[in-house]
Image: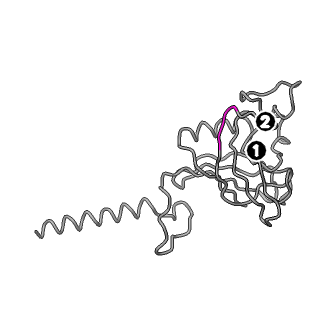
């Protein structure tokens, strides 16, 4: 009987140590959880974070994390240089957690085509404007290729100035293709977290 109790105690201790090693928030740079708080999402969750650069909004970054570990970072822009998240059509994306509504490699919107991730509508920081039709996207044709020099400017990537957007998160064509490839492999997150 005593041997069974010792074996049970050792098994419980092993489970406790394993739990502490796999769920430690310190390795992810997260604050420790408060007592009684709900447990964090699985350590293997894929997370997508858009980190806005206040001094250069068109040189912000979109990062992919898996279980809290940074795996990929892509240069990204949002807006036309304005840090006013309530300025529709020109200000950068408001901070918050945006639900991913749709992802497509052949999106065929009026302005956005090809690889696109459509996000929920969300109010700006002052609550005065609802930011609508927000995406993670690039400049490409519906099939994901680039238009030629005589094609529409909105369907070809010409360089740094193309990181500007109406507020969406904008990536270069190679970056968004790689993002889709990696998220297909790792598992798509349900949300985009936007921070500054």
Quadrant including the C terminus: bottom right
Q: What colour scheme was applied to this rendering of the protein?
A: one colour
**Magenta range:** 102-106
Which residue is tagged 2?
Answer: 139
In the shown orientation, is residue 72 left or right of residue 77? left
Label count reads: 2
Does the magenta segment cover residue 68? no
Of 121 and 36, which appears nearest the observer?
121
Of 78 and 166, which appears nearest the observer?
166
Q: Quadrant of residue 19?
A: bottom left
Of 65 and 119, which appears nearest the observer?
119
Where is residue 29 drawn, in percent x and y?
57, 63
Where is residue 70 drawn, in percent x and y?
58, 51
Which residue is tagged 1?
Answer: 170
Label 1 packing within 10 angstroms: few (<14), some (14-19), many (20+):
many
Label 2 packing within 10 angstroms: few (<14), some (14-19), many (20+):
many
Where is residue 81 drawn, in percent x and y?
86, 53
In the shown orientation, is residue 91 left or right of residue 123? right
Where is residue 120 drawn, in percent x and y?
69, 51
Residue 57's label in the rendered image is none
For marks 1 and 2, give the CA distance.
8 Å
- The image shows residue 72, relative to residue 41, as above or below, that is above
Q: Name the chief secondary structure element in magenta.
A: strand
Mark 1 touching mark 2, by CB under 8 A?
A: yes
Name which residue lies at 87% across and 33% down: 153
Of 14 and 132, which appears nearest the observer?
132
Quadrant including the N terminus: bottom left
Which structural element holds mark 2? loop
């Amino acid at each position: 009987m005593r041997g069974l109790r010792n074996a049970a105690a050792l098994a419980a201790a092993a489970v406790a140590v394993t739990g502490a090693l796999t769920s430690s928030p310190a390795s992810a740079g997260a604050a420790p959880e408060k007592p009684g708080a709900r447990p964090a999402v699985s350590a293997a969750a894929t997370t997508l974070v858009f980190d806005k650069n206040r001094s250069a909004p068109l040189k912000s970054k979109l990062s992919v994390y898996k279980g809290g570990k940074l795996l990929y970072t892509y240069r990204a822009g949002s807006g036309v240089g304005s840090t006013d998240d309530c300025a529709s059509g020109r200000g950068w994306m408001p901070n918050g957690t945006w639900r991913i509504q749709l992802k497509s490699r052949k999106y065929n919107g009026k302005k956005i085509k090809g690889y696109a991730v459509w996000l929920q509508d969300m109010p700006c920081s002052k609550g005065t404007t609802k930011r609508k039709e927000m995406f993670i996207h690039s400049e490409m044709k519906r099939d994901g290729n680039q238009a030629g020099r005589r094609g529409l400017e909105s369907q070809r990537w010409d360089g740094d100035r193309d990181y500007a957007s109406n507020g969406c998160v904008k990536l270069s064509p190679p970056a968004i293709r790689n993002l889709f490839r990696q998220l297909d492999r790792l598992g798509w997150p349900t949300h985009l977290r936007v921070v500054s």
